[in-house]
Amino acid sequence: MTTVVASNYTAHKERKWTDYFTFSTDHKVIGIQYLVTSFAFYFIGGAFAEVIRTELATADPDFVTPALYNQFMTIHGTIMIFLWIVPAGAAFANYLIPLMIGAEDMAFPTLNAVAFWLTPPGGILLLASFFVPNGAPQAGWTSYPPLSLVSGVWGEEIWILSVLLVGTSSILGAINFVTTIFKMRIPDMDLHSMPLFCWSMLATSALILLSTPVLAAALVLLSFDLIAGTAFFNPTGGGDPIVYQHMFWFYSHPAVYIMILPFFGVISEVLPVHSRKPIFGYRAIAYSSLAISFLGLIVWAHHMFTSGTPGWLRIFFMAATMLIAVPTGIKIFSWSATLWGGKLNLNTAMLFGVGFIATFVMGGLTGVMLSSVPFNIHVHDTYFVVGHFHYVLFGGAAMGLFAGFYHWFPKMTGRMINEPLGKLHFILLFIGLNITFLPMHKLGLMGMNRRIALYDVQFEPINLICTIGAYILAVSSLPFVINILWSLNQGEKAARNPWRAYTLEWQTSSPPIIENFEEEPVLWTGPYDYGTDSEVVNEEETVDDMLAEVGSQLRYRS
């Protein structure tokens, strides 16, 4: 009797597009679900940003009412942080970690699916807040009391529930990432031979697990103040709103690193491949991620230098904030040294990688300025802070996100991206970003407060420039969307390893089969040994690759 054994390749071919709308436990499906969902919210949050910038093009509130402006501003910030950048980092982690360490899936596949399916309801709830009495929340993404206690109970309650759902998703994901990295690596892979992206996700997960429960506690207490009449943070009943600030920023400053650390890892993967050089200072980059994770937990009060913080405590947080620039500087130096003397392939992924370094350095320099107490007090709550914040998170995280997107697009889809459209996307994004956010530093130094729709007419010319930059940013999304649609349908079919990279995800087909690998992958070189004696030439489609593809289709056993 002849028994036909279905190959992994066959199982892969049976996957349907409807799988991406189901409760799938495949980490690759979940990763793409996260990625598509996060970009859906990116476009929604970006639309709110365009409304905000249109309103700020002139000094008078002549496009939307001040109340609606406050609502758009609050929802924009919440979406871009909790529903775009954080889930986008989780998307790459879900898709790549098992592939990078040679595992078939995450340690807890069902928990992984639950983590994702908490995110869409959180986003839908947030958007639904526009339709409740008094509308969406108006207290900003920080939701400081007492303002959050008087600006609309139901909108604020929905905001709290939305953030709690997304925060729970982050915690469940972090548990999965840590367990998977420590317990499911192939036997030949020790901690110092795994990709740096995995190190960055260990640091990110540690921050999530230590800080997110504190934010959850603050939001639950704030909810009690809103609907149960308690006075944890309500000063009229003896509560202390400063305690809320401490609890909020104990999470929300580490949240900056929760957002940026995954893309530090992405940049550490992209630059060596496309410069054909070993990463400079592997262990320094790995351990600096852990140092950022630790220091990120002890710098939160630099957001509160104007909140009555004692002088001696200000000094501590000023010094700690300055100190965190050291491990970040180590990364910047290592990435720059990796590029130096390399054989640079200036494709779209590489352009976004280099753009990341340029924009993040700008955000880092202004961050060091803000760590100084006298300067911080001078520009606190001005547009200088807005410019700094967006250079770090939009200039940094978004550039890193797009670098990773274009780098792994062939692996995820089996299609090559359209490079001219990708480069047009980069050019428009880079120009729009700098025109939008660089002038904001000048606005802040001139004294323009943030979060206001009505401002002094002297600030109008610079605001108009910022608004023009925001429109360029909006236009930059068009080649991005067109590129995705065109490449998915007409793009050149991708080889197993089009970049000739050495990390394990490139040892399987593009896109990967359901169980990831036909057999346990072999760690035949270091992840970044480009140009060294151990380098093995791996062309885009070698004879071995072709034989493996044929063998995967014809694997029958008699």
Image: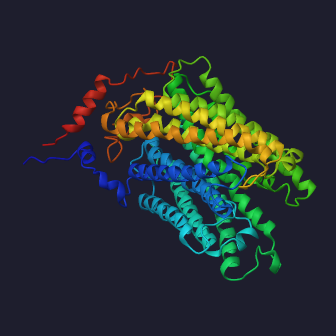
Q: Is residue 422 above or below residue 168?
A: above
Q: Nearer the viewer, residue 135 or 502?
A: 135
Give the vertical position of 237 relative to 246 (above or below): below
Q: Is residue 191 visible?
A: no
In the image: residue 328, left or right of residue 353: right
- Image position of 233 with respect to 523: above or below: below
Seen from the viewer's position, the closer of residues 28 and 522 is 28
| Residue 132 as seen in the image, left or right of residue 361 | left
Q: Is residue 126 left or right of residue 17?
A: right
| x and y, in percent, of residue 346 in the image | 51, 23
Q: Looking at this view, name the residue that lies furthest to the left.
A: 1
Report x, y in % for residue 235.
Answer: 82, 75
Number of numbered discs visible in the structure rendering: 0
Q: Position of residue 480 (x, y in %)?
A: 46, 38
Q: Is residue 432 visible?
A: yes
Vertical relation: 360 (above or below) 17: above
Q: Residue furthest right?
A: 311
As rendered, which of 442 and 160 lies closer to the eye?
442
Image location (x, y in percent) of residue 118: 49, 64
Q: Front-most of 123 and 23? A: 123
* Quadrant of image for the C terminus: top left
Residue, x 54% and y 51% (percent of image)?
Answer: 47
Q: What residue do we see at 78% from left, 54% from top?
A: 303
Write the residue at 58% across / 28% down.
279
Q: How is the image coloured?
A: rainbow
Occupied quadrant, residue 148: bottom right
